[in-house]
Every structure is written in structure tokens, then in C-alpha cells.
Amino acid sequence: MATLHGIVLAAGAGTRMGRAKALMRHPDGTPWLAEACAMLASAGSSSVTVVLGSSSDEARGLVPPGVHVVVARDWASGMAASLRAGLEAAAASDADASLITLVDLPGLPASVGLRVSADIEGANARAVLRQAVFGGRPGHPVLVGRDHWAALASELSGDRGARPYLARHGVLEVECGDLATGEDVDRPQADDRPGIHNRPEKGDGPGTP
């Protein structure tokens, strides 16, 4: 049975939101961080790491017990710093693959993560590359086998996320549009109720982990 390590990327300042997305809550008070961690656990992750950056001291209090926290010290340089920090944390575990999501996907159901990570076993899990797509649009979570972690981390830079690496190595797209929209929340008005998401702007969407 393959072992998964979940990663929640939550380091950004959330400029358009007016506050760090790691601090956001649903109207009922549930932190987006807690929901993202629960989604990864329900999707089969035996351990979870949250990557913080902006407002990290305050955000720590919203992380569920038992979840590992790392702070990407150079988080302001772009998403690459957060993803690199998450992969480094995963490398300290014995996981075969990492299941990666973003904090600004409130309402994303565990069924999406379960579909992306379905039927991976043993050595095959360490070589896996899969990404949820929604109506063909790349999104999250992304499943990255351990064999790819070092190579992927080595080429991350600024706001250039994993997309070039995934494309070059033949990522398997897993259609999940029947389960969720996969769209992130960029602005305050998008958070009127869970599951209602604004479409991401070019270069800032969930397709760039």
C-alpha cells in the first residue's frame, strides 16, 4: 500500500483578499487551513505538512493538531519557494508520493483527492505524476511521486511552479469536473459561501502549483 504525504501551500500574502489566505475562515468559523488538511487526510494522506509564510505566527493557531508546519522564509519570492519547502518536508517522511493542494480552494471535496490518488501501489507510486483537471483546466490536488521530488524542487523558481515539469514528464490528467469546480478564491466577495469560487486570473490559478 502506497503512503501519501499531504502538502497544503498556504504562504501567500493574499493581496487581493486583503489578508493572508492562511487566516481565512468559512462563515461558520472553520479555517480554510483546517479544511484543506482534513481533505488531504480523508483522501488518504497519512501525514500532512502546511507551508506558511505571510502571517505565519497567527496562522499557526489555525493548523490542526498533529499537522506539521514549515515556514518558507523566502515565501515572498513566489510560489516556488512554498512548493520547495513542502517537498523538502515530505522528503523527511517515508512517503511514496505527495498529494499537494492550495489553501484557497475552500469546499474542495476529498473525493477529488481520492480520485487523483486512486490505485497507486508500491514502486509505481514513487514514479507517479497526476493532476486534477476540471473541464480540462489544470487544478489541484497534484500527486507527485517521490522519484520526482528532488528534480522538481531543483528547477522551481519565482512564480514558476510545477507546470513545466509536469508537462515535460507526461503528467496524467484526472478529470474531476463532475466532483467540483476546482476554482480558487481570489477576492473577498468570492467567500460569500463555501464552494463559490472566482475564476483565477492568468498566472495565478490553481494550475500552477
Image (spheres, helix red, strand yellow):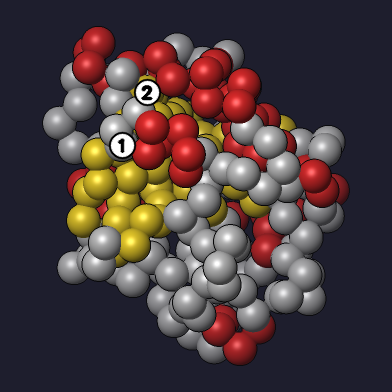
- Tell which circle, 1 or 2, labels the residue nearer the N-terminal end: 2
Secondary structure beneath label 2 = strand
Q: Residue furthest left?
A: 119
Front-most of 198 and 34?
Answer: 198
Q: Amino acid at mark 1?
A: Val
Local crowd at mark 1 within 10 Å, few (<14), some, or many (≥20)?
A: some
Residue 131 screen position, x and y as percent: 33, 45
Q: Amino acid at mark 2?
A: Gly
Local crowd at mark 2 within 10 Å, few (<14), some, or many (≥20)?
A: many
Front-most of 118 and 130?
Answer: 130
To which residue does mark 1 refer? Answer: 171
Please tell me how many numbered marks the rendered image carries.
2
To which residue does mark 2 refer? Answer: 145
Residue 143 screen position, x and y as percent: 36, 36
User: Looking at the image, is 58 positioned above or below residue 197?
Assistant: above
Residue 180 screen position, x and y as percent: 29, 68
Q: Residue at x 67, y 30 (%)?
A: 85
User: Looking at the image, is 129 positioned above or below residue 17?
Assistant: above
Q: Residue at x 80, y 44 (%)?
A: 77
User: Can residue 36 be seen at all in this image of the molecule?
Assistant: no
User: Can residue 193 be seen at all in this image of the molecule?
Assistant: yes
Secondary structure beneath label 1 = loop
Could you say which quadrant of the image residue 128 lies in? top left
